[in-house]
Image: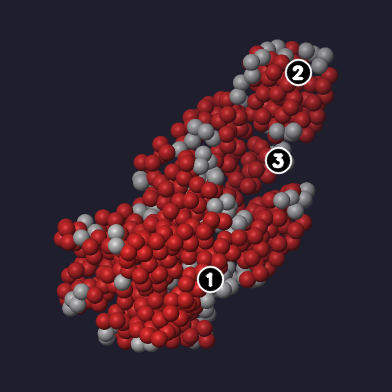
Amino acid sequence: MNSRRLSFAVYCAAAIALVIAAYANSLHNSFHFDDSHVIETNLYLRNLNNVLRFFTDAHTFSSLPQNATYRPLVTLSLAVDYARGHGLDPRAFHTTQIALMLITGALLVLFFTPLIGEWLALFAATLFCVHTANTETMNLISARSELLSTIGLLLAFVLYQRSPFARRTLLYLLPLAIGALAKAPLVVFAPLLFAYAMLFEGQTPRRAFRTMLPSLLVGIALLVFLNAMNAREWTSGGGSRWAYLITQPFVWLHYFRLFFLPLGLTADTDWGTFAQWYDTRAVAGYAFVALLIWWSRRSARDEAGRPVAFGLIWFAVALIPTSSFFPLAEVANEHRVFFAFVGLVLAVPAWIAAWSEKHTGLRNVVIACAVAVLLAHAIGTHERNEVWRDEETLWADVVVKSPMNGRAWMNFGLTHMARGRYAEAKAAFDRAALYTPKYSYLEINQGIVEGQLGHSTEAERHFRNALAMTADANAHFFFARWLVRVGRAPEALDHLKASLSQSSAAPAPRALLLRLDDARGAEAETRALLEETRSLDPTEPSIADVTRTWPSYAAAFAGGLAAIQRQDWPAAAHASREALHHDPQSADAWNNLGWSLAQLGFRTEAVEAYRAALARNPTHERARNNLQLVLATK
């Protein structure tokens, strides 16, 4: 290896070390946002035997049907991380994120080298990997779709560039198709290839169109296939197409500013769409788009400027799927810049390099500034990772930067509620209601906190409001959970079944329904649900709850008493039934079973248990008193 190659290898190693150092403090960061339903409550991830199902059923992507888009490659990678980490260990998921970022950086070096040279390519790739604005994509594990799809597109370009065989046989389209299994917008490869062919291969527009035609047809076919594979309940959550369209040029300007000055980053903006096309911000956005077009056309005129033109075109084309006339629930999201910034890390360094060629005396200054920029971004990324450390640090940051964001205040309230600070949680929820008064998730959480504060009437009102707004799996489950806690389990059964029918991947409603069926002695229902749960995840804890056995009557009876003491009524009922398995004539066990069922609200079953106790011991005073109490409240 000659000294030049050795020097380049050393700098590559330094770049890798810088990326790892920038993200080293993210390894223990918690899950956030969509991670809750894509990872934490997604039962399908917990069993690698579901791999084939990932590719045939979009419901395996999320425990929320309305979010069940077809991204099997993402689901597969998350399931592997779950297996590697033996559960929901964030380190396993974050190490994969960092590894995928390093792969992205390596592909950028390969892709950019023919365009701007290997040294500038290394700088551009390193800048991309440590850019502070990319921290959202790296810390939001469910945004792995951005990483995987970007890798697929870059690999397609590298094969097109470097392999005549791949170009001749269209093999370069294979990674494009694989990457599409992570995210649909890879259809943008075709217009990017068209621009590449014209700018760097000197092809005429007609010839460039023929070059990109196979990828265009494949892209359209992939898009049709992916849309067909989405769950029927899936929705983009967007509103007015026109309002979204007139807002996005200003959002582009915002994203462009973040590339140069990534300050004020927030995980969830409080932006809304513009009401009028002539809004001052909208006009500023139109002017920016016009400037982008002018700059691209001007740069394309000479050889040195072509990488600049291609990078600017990449930035614009990459934003079209999410930031144009396809309305999404959020007007702006900072993980959307990930793919688009590939274009800017090419355009801006290429423009600076072309400028520095005309000012050779400033070469060392430019190099020093470049190193400073990389270090500044690495430090900024390291600091931003601290904001993403857990839910409380993240949402505390969001409500400061987006003070009129109702969802942010709701999530900030959830961090209080998780720590038992119910009064603070209620205050945050009340503030959220000022900005999002008709938000079903907020109503659910208001119901939960009112329940914790002992305000039963208010709690039920909020839960029923949530169901009236959106009778989804969450609304049914959390109402059911509250009903069980206040001794109204019979009413909870239908809500749990509704929740499970809408979200079969969610473990919580499945576990609660399984334990209630077991507690009330519904053997057929328990057996059917148990077998289904075993097929999805044989390690699901609720399986152990309803299949636990004790070696003797005394052990089972003691287990039941312990469960009664901690007010775990399903466990108490199960243990009492196990005690009766050892000694069906135990009046005490029948009485304990009746008490547990009565606390859950299964009064008919409780009456039967008390009468069974009295049939075995007519002088059992406690069973007699308990029976009279239940009959008086029926």
Q: Residues within 10 Å of mark 2 (few under 14, many from 20)?
A: many
Q: Position of residue 390 (x, y in %)?
A: 62, 55
* SS assignment at label 1: helix
At horizontal 48% and vertical 51% (from top left) the residue drawn is: 95
Residue 101 relative to residue 540: left or right:
left
Of the pair 554 and 164, the residue shown nearer to us: 164
How many marks are shown on the rendered structure?
3
User: How far apart are the alpha carbons under marks 3 and 1?
Assistant: 52 Å
Q: Is residue 67 visible?
A: no
Dot in front, 2 or 1? 1
State how far apart marks 3 and 2 are (Cα): 24 Å
Residue named by callout 2: 588
Q: Foreground residue, 596 or 631? A: 596
Residue drawn where x is 22% and y is 73% of the image = 197
User: In the rendered image, which quarter contains the N terminus?
Assistant: bottom left
Q: Compared to 485, does 143 lie above or below?
A: below
Which type of secondary structure does the marked residue at label 3 adopt? helix
User: Label 1, on which residue?
Assistant: 376
Residue type at numbered disc 3: Arg
In the rendered image, which residue does mark 3 sit on? 485
- Neighbourhood count class around disc 3 (C-alpha, 10 Å): few under 14, some 14–19, many 20 upward: some
Q: How many residues crowd mark 1 within 10 Å: few (<14), some (14–19), many (20+)?
A: some
Sequence order check, earlier mark of 3 and 1: 1
